[in-house]
Image (tube, rainbow, N blue to C red):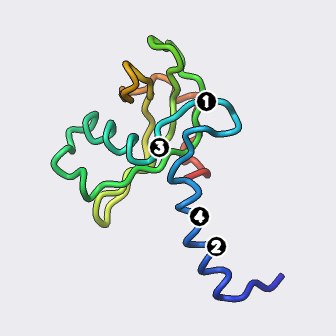
């Protein structure tokens, strides 16, 4: 199948946009959007000073093991700061309409590396 270069470029540009706000996915798990995820991952990792340079993309999300908060989910995420990137997992949950993140104990439920990332 042949795809014209212009179409391929547009599809490549649209892919990150499709993942930028996945807060209401078909699996029914409420999750933070890209900005919210980056804010709480910056706080979790102690990288608040680098937040302006940081992007976070969520991958696979599942209900968290040992959840301590209603709606707590465990997700893989890709963290990019400058030219560097890393893949990890964290739990996300809301308290008073504000997203929070904490280290996850659900690693065995999440793919690594995650093909969704």
Coordinates of residue 70 in the picture (x, y in percent): 51, 14
The image shows residue 82, relative to residue 26, as above or below, that is below
Mark 4 neighbour class, 10 Å CA radius: few under 14, some 14 to 19, many 20 or more: few
Q: Mark 2 points at which residue?
A: 11
Disc 1 element: loop
Q: Which of marks 3 and 4 is nearer the N terminus?
A: 4
Q: Please tell me which residue lies in front, 113 or 117.
A: 117
Which dot marks residue 15? Answer: 4
Which quadrant does the N terminus fall into? bottom right
Alpha carbons under labels 4 and 1: distance apart: 21 Å
Coordinates of residue 62 in the picture (x, y in percent): 60, 29
Residue at the image position 59 percent from the left and 64 percent from the top:
15
Q: Name the residue under label 1.
A: 29
Mark 3 neighbour class, 10 Å CA radius: few under 14, some 14 to 19, many 20 or more: some
Coordinates of residue 114 in the picture (x, y in percent): 57, 47
Q: Do the residues labelled 3 and 2 touch (CB within 8 Å)?
A: no
Mark 2 neighbour class, 10 Å CA radius: few under 14, some 14 to 19, many 20 or more: few
Alpha carbons under labels 1 and 2: distance apart: 26 Å
Disc 4 element: helix
Q: Mark 3 points at which residue?
A: 33
| Residue farthest left in this picture | 49
Q: Are marks 2 and 4 in contact (CB under 8 Å)?
A: yes
Q: Which of marks 1 and 2 is nearer the N terminus?
A: 2
Q: Please tell me which residue lies in front, 85 or 98.
A: 98
Q: Earlier in the sequence, mark 4 or mark 1?
A: 4
Coordinates of residue 89 in the picture (x, y in percent): 45, 36
30 horizontally vs 8: left or right:
left
């Amino acid at each position: 199948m042949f795809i014209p270069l212009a179409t391929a470029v547009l599809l490549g540009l649209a892919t990150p946009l499709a993942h930028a706000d996945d807060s209401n996915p078909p699996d029914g798990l409420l999750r933070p959007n890209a900005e919210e995820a980056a804010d709480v991952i910056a706080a979790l990792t102690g990288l608040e000073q680098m937040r302006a340079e940081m992007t976070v993309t969520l991958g696979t999300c599942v209900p968290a093991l040992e959840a301590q908060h209603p709606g707590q989910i465990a997700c893989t995420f890709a963290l990019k700061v400058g030219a560097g990137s890393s893949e990890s997992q964290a739990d996300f949950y809301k308290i008073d309409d504000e997203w929070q993140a904490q280290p996850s104990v659900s690693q065995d439920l999440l793919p690594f590396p995650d093909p969704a990332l």
